Image (cartoon, grey):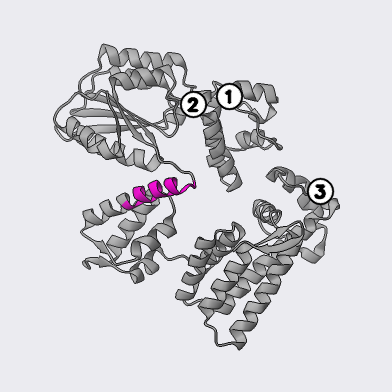
């Protein structure tokens, strides 16, 4: 069987609509794209004679129960579609590293439930129990279980993470479960029964995948999530395709420049792009066009969100993004002096947190784990009542601030304050426009680097 992708999905839908046998389809890749495609396939399967879609959570799936349902004749009329979301059948330890990156990302973003879910998926990929603590494994054991080197740093947070979050009752996907499924499909299932398997990650080298793809339909919806220009181009193409489809369904068009603003605001989240576009289309009523004012009204960020994004872009040295956000802040009526005040407070906090790192009694070091920071560093820091306000807030948020500050030198941060003071004076006492002053300030901050104590401009 051919492996379909986004460009050939319609071919698969036409084949199903024409009555071609479709006992099973595997969809893998970007989650929301898989969900959308599964909806389309389910609709095509149930188009003639109706039917029912049975949703199954792959994290808690009992494979023998799913298999029994697939083999059984239903008393209900029409097509019976069994849709397994997050199937683990095609996992192996060869994809554990990709899953681990998702664990770390979710953990650093403070999403414990999401991190735990991905961590249990990684354990399942290695054939381990969902309660096993990977952080307790030795370097050799980790390499043997997951086929990649154990990450540096303290991983003592993995055990408490699994203990403190809801435990899945999933039965691990074994080779037997996959072989039993293939055997059942080969022997034939009731013609009105179909199985949809959705997976974010899978191992194409696994025998089960090779056998399945040789006999049944496979839909590859993976998208390169990297930061290269080619990856960014692919991501933008996916988002534009999603937005265009929604606009066509609603009979709407966008004014010039609106789609660029929308793409910037949603980021690479295809599901969010669809939701926000639908919200825009509904908000304008009978009007055929969606304007920038409509976008700002319905998808506009709050001042706090936009300000946070500006400081984040400056901290990440993302020139293009920082300039766009600074311009948008002023377009939305935020005065240039308020933008400068935001950058001043951001820099002062970085300077404080960087200076505190230089003091050994607080035990901060680059690469420290969040839980170690909370248990060892934070109590010592809070003993200093001079910084009570600055050190208030959620421990993980403070950890991220310290982590960001560690990337900048003290001379560079002091230089930033001098740049900000000069910009403040220009705004108050020169005829130069606020846009020009802010753009010059952002460029000067991001392009100045510290090289062995000497400050240099990269442009």
- Which numbered disc covers residue 147? 1
Give left or right: position of 322 versus 22.
Answer: right
> How far across and down, in percent of the image, does residue 231 sit?
43, 45
Dot 1 alpha-carbon crowd within 10 angstroms: few under 14, some 14 to 19, many 20 or more: some
Residue at 61% in and 59% down? 315
> How far across and down, in percent of the image, does residue 131 sit?
60, 27
Query: In terms of secondary structure, what is the magenta stretch mainly?
Result: helix
Q: Earlier in the sequence, mark 3 or mark 1?
A: 1
Q: Quadrant of the C terminus?
A: bottom right
Q: Quadrant of residue 36?
A: top left
Q: Earlier in the sequence, mark 3 or mark 2?
A: 2
| Magenta region | 227-240
- Which numbered disc covers residue 363? 3
Give left or right: position of 38 versus 202.
Answer: left
Q: Quadrant of residue 205?
A: top left
Q: Which SS class for mark 2? A: loop
Dot 2 alpha-carbon crowd within 10 angstroms: few under 14, some 14 to 19, many 20 or more: some
Q: Nearer the viewer, mark 3 or mark 1?
A: 1
Q: Nearer the viewer, mark 2 or mark 1?
A: 1
Task: Report the residue marked by disc 2.
Answer: 170
CA distance separating discs 2 and 1: 23 Å
Q: Earlier in the sequence, mark 2 or mark 1?
A: 1
CA distance separating discs 3 and 2: 40 Å
| 166 relative to 345, above or below | above
Label 3 with label 2: CB-CB less than 8 Å: no
Q: Which SS class for mark 3? A: loop
Residue at 25% in and 23% down? 23
> How far across and down, in percent of the image, does residue 392 sit?
70, 60
Residue at 67% in and 58% down? 393
């Amino acid at each position: 069987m051919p492996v379909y992708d986004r460009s050939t999905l319609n071919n698969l839908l036409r084949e199903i609509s024409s009555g071609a046998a479709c006992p099973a389809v595997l969809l893998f890749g970007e989650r929301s794209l898989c969900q959308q495609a599964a909806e389309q396939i389910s609709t095509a399967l149930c188009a003639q004679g109706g039917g029912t879609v049975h949703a199954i959570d792959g994290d808690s799936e009992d494979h023998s129960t799913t298999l029994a349902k697939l083999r059984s004749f239903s008393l209900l009329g029409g097509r019976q579609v069994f849709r397994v979301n997050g199937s683990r059948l095609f996992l192996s330890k060869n994809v554990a590293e990709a899953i681990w990156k998702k664990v770390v990302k979710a953990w650093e973003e403070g999403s414990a439930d999401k991190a735990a879910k991905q961590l249990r998926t990684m354990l399942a990929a290695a054939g381990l129990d969902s309660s096993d603590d990977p952080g307790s494994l030795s370097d050799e054991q980790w390499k043997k279980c997951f086929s990649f080197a154990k990450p540096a740093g303290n991983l003592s947070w993995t055990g408490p993470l699994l203990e403190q979050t809801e435990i899945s009752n999933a039965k691990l996907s074994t080779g037997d479960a996959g072989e039993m499924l293939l055997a059942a499909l080969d022997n034939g299932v009731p013609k009105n029964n179909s199985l949809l398997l959705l997976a974010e990650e899978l191992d194409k080298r696994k025998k089960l995948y090779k056998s399945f793809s040789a006999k049944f339909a496979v839909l590859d919806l993976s998208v390169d999530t990297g930061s290269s220009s080619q990856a960014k181009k692919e991501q933008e193409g996916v988002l534009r395709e999603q937005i265009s489809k929604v606009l066509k369904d609603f009979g709407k068009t966008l004014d010039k420049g609106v789609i660029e603003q929308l793409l910037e605001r949603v980021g690479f989240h295809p599901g969010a792009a669809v939701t926000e576009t639908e919200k825009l289309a509904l908000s304008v009523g009978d009007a055929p066009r969606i304007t920038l004012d409509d976008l700002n009204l319905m998808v506009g960020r709050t001042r706090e969100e936009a300000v946070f994004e500006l400081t984040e872009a400056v901290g990440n040295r993302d020139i293009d993004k920082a300039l766009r956000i600074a311009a948008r802040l002023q377009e939305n009526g935020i005065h240039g002096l308020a933008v400068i005040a935001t950058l001043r407070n951001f820099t002062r906090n970085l300077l404080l947190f960087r200076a505190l790192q230089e003091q050994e009694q607080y035990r901060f070091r680059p690469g420290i784990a969040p839980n170690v920071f909370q248990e060892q560093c934070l109590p010592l820091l809070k003993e200093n009542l001079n910084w009570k306000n600055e050190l208030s807030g959620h421990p993980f948020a403070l950890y991220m601030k310290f982590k960001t500050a560690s990337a900048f030198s003290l001379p560079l941060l002091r230089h930033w304050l001098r740049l900000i003071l000069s910009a403040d004076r220009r705004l108050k006492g020169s005829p130069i426009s606020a846009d020009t002053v802010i753009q010059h300030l952002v460029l000067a901050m991001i392009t100045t680097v510290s090289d062995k104590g000497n400050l240099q401009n990269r442009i």
